[in-house]
Amino acid sequence: AQTVTQSQPEMSVQEAETVTLSCTYDTSENNYYLFWYKQPPSRQMILVIRQEAYKQQNATENRFSVNFQKAAKSFSLKISDSQLGDTAMYFCAFMNGNQGGKLIFGQGTELSVKP
Amino acid sequence: ETGVTQSPTHLIKTRGQQVTLRCSSQSGHNTVSWYQQALGQGPQFIFQYYREEENGRGNFPPRFSGLQFPNYSSELNVNALELDDSALYLCASSLDSQGPQHFGDGTRLSIL
């Protein structure tokens, strides 16, 4: 069974600084996708970034980038130039490419950006 | 482009009752997935519907059932409600069964 682990329940960062959120996963599959989702207090889950396992290049979306280490089964999220609006719960998620669209989520990391 | 919409926003029920939650998928999306998110936890997959057929189910009892309509909107039905069913229920739609999932705002279900 696949599992996703986020070992940092809470993190904080000063506005304009950089922060990295950690995620590890366990799978025996080769075909899979990894995601980071953001859930602000408004509760809507927002897709931040997506990574296909077969791609070696790390995905990037503006201030958000990932460090995908396939052999280590690690998928960290780096947020550059942190903004107050980045304050939210961040969830790492795994999808098995051979088993349809089931997303397996980690427990989440609560990020606070301080002015 | 209209995003994923869920109704109602908040619902209060008592144990043993039945509830129906509704979800309208994003325009052009034919797949809907449902998740249960307990307080302080990550979402748990309930099931997915792809072109009106169930396409995968998580570890939830049969009293959790669903439906997808020809316009790809979807319903989640829960019978014989239990206190542990209190949670945020999230619906997500995608272009296909493996595409990136876009979530609605959720329905907060409280069981008394």
Image: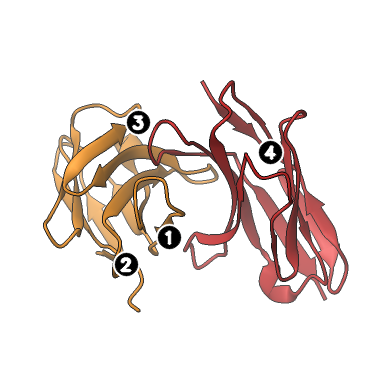
Chain colours: A red, B orange
Drawn side of residue A75 relative to residue B22, left or right: right
**Disc 2 sits on a residue from what chain?**
B
Residue A6 badge: 4
* Neighbour tally class for label 4: few under 14, some 14-19, many 20 plus, Cα within 10 Å: many
Are the numbered discs 2 and 3 placed on the same chain, yes or no? yes
Residue, x 54% and y 26% (percent of image)? A2
Confirm whether circles 4 and 3 share one chain.
no
Q: CA distance from mark 4 to mark 1?
A: 22 Å
Residue A100 place in picture, x, y as percent? 38, 37
Determine which of the numbered discs, if any, sits on residue B58 in the image: 3
Name the foreground residue: B76 vs A55.
Answer: A55
Q: Residue A23 in the image: x percent, y percent?
A: 71, 40
- Label 2 sits on residue: B26
**Observer-nearest residue: A94 or B23?**
A94
User: Label 4 sits on what residue type?
Assistant: Gln
> Which residue: 61% across, 33% down?
A4
Between marks 1 and 3, how big is the CA–CA gap? Answer: 19 Å
- Label pair 2/1, CB-CB below 8 angstroms: yes
Give the residue type at disc 3. Answer: Gly
